[in-house]
Amino acid sequence: MVVTSNPDKAEEIGLYLKEYLEVEHIAMEIPEYRDDDVAEIAKKKGEYAYQVIQKPLIVDDTAFCIDTLHGFPGPYAAYVQKTLGNAGILKLMENQKDRNAYFETAIAFVNSKGIRVFRGRIEGIIVPERGSLGFGYDPIFEWEGRTLAELSTEEKSWISHRARALAAFKKWLKEGGIDSFAI
Amino acid sequence: MVVTSNPDKAEEIGLYLKEYLEVEHIAMEIPEYRDDDVAEIAKKKGEYAYQVIQKPLIVDDTAFCIDTLHGFPGPYAAYVQKTLGNAGILKLMENQKDRNAYFETAIAFVNSKGIRVFRGRIEGIIVPERGSLGFGYDPIFEWEGRTLAELSTEEKSWISHRARALAAFKKWLKEGGIDSFAI
C-alpha cells in the first residue's frame, strides 16, 4: 500500500500506477520545509511522514522558477501567487530579455528500506496573460507556443511536470526498482 | 535555563534578560514552517524544539510585510532578498501610493507548562535606497524620517522589532508571568 498526502491527486496517481502499487489517500499535516530545491523538500516531507505513519508512501512538492529572478518564486509559488499574483510577476519581468522559466515537481517514495526522489520538469517562457483554463501561473507560462491556460485539462495533464515525475517513478517501478530497493 | 536557536542573538538576549533567566545558546536545525503569521511560525518552531530538547527555550521568527503587496514578502523575506533583492521590491512598488510596511518579530517561550508568544513590530514606509549601514531591507525601509541603514547599530537595536518583542517578554517575566505560567 502507498499513501499520498495530496487529496486531489490520489485517485489520478492510483490509476496511473495501478499495475504496480495500490494507492490510498491519507490526509496529514506535514511541516512545509523551506529549501531552494523541491527534491530536498519532498525528501524531508517524505521522511517526516514516514516517521508518523510507518507505511510506504508518496509525497510531492512543486516549484515555479524564473531564471532571471534567480529561481523566484521557487517553492513559494503558492504564497507569491496569493500576494503578488501574475501582475506582480509580469511587473518584475518588465524589460527582462531572458524569459525562461520552468515548473518542477519532485515525488518522493519512501518505504522501510529508504527513500527515492523522482523529478519532472516543464520548461517555457513568461508571456503576457493568455487563455482562460487552468489556474495560478498557467496564463503567463507558455510551452511550445501555447500558455498552459490555453491547453485542455487533459492535454495539460499529459505534458505537466507532475506527469513527468510520475512517469519517471513508473519507469522505475516497471524496471523492478522497488524490488531491488526493498531488498 | 533557557535555550535559543539563534547564535548571533543569544548573548544579547542573555544580557537583556539576565535578571530573570539564564540564557545559553544551542544550535539546532528546526524545520522552517510556512505560515502567513510569524507568531504561528515561532509557536510551531518552539513546539518542535521543545519536543527535541525538553528544556525551557526561546525561538524567534521575523517577517517583513508590505501592505499594498498583501504582506509580501512576509516570512519569506530572506529568500526574496536573495532572489529579487531591494531592486525587485522597488520595482514592485513603482507607482504604488500606499508605501506602508513593517517588520515583525515573534519570540516564543516554551517550558513544560506551555508556550507563550511575544510580538514586536516597527512600522515605516518603503523608499528608494538610502544609507550604508545594516543589511537586507534596511536601506529601503524608512522609520521616522531615516532608513534603518541610516541608523547606527546601537540605535537600531533599541528601536527594532526584535527589541520590542524582547521588551514584551521582559515585561511578562518582570510581572511574574513565568511563575503563574509554570504553576
Image (cartoon, coloured by chain):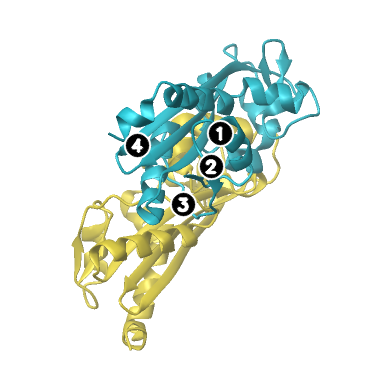
Chain colours: A cyan, B yellow
Kindly indicate whether the residue at mark 4 contacts the one at mark 1 (C-beta within 8 angstroms). Answer: no
Residue at the disc numbered 2: A23
Q: Nearer the viewer, mark 2 or mark 3?
A: 2
Q: Is residue B98 left or right of residue B159?
A: right
Circles 1 and 4 on the same chain: yes
Residue at the disc numbered 1: A18
Which structural element holds mark 2?
strand
State the CA–CA distance, disc 4 to disc 3: 17 Å
Mark 4 residue type: Ile
Q: Chain of mark 1?
A: A
Q: Chain of mark 2?
A: A
Q: Position of residue B56 (x, y in %)?
A: 26, 71
Circles 2 and 3 on the same chain: yes
Kindly indicate whether the residue at mark 1 contacts the one at mark 2 (C-beta within 8 angstroms). Answer: yes
Quick one: label 2, few (<14), some, or many (20+) residues within 10 Å? many
Residue at the disc numbered 3: A30
Which structural element holds mark 1?
loop
Location of the C terminus of chain A (image quadrant): top left
Q: Nearer the viewer, mark 1 or mark 4?
A: 1
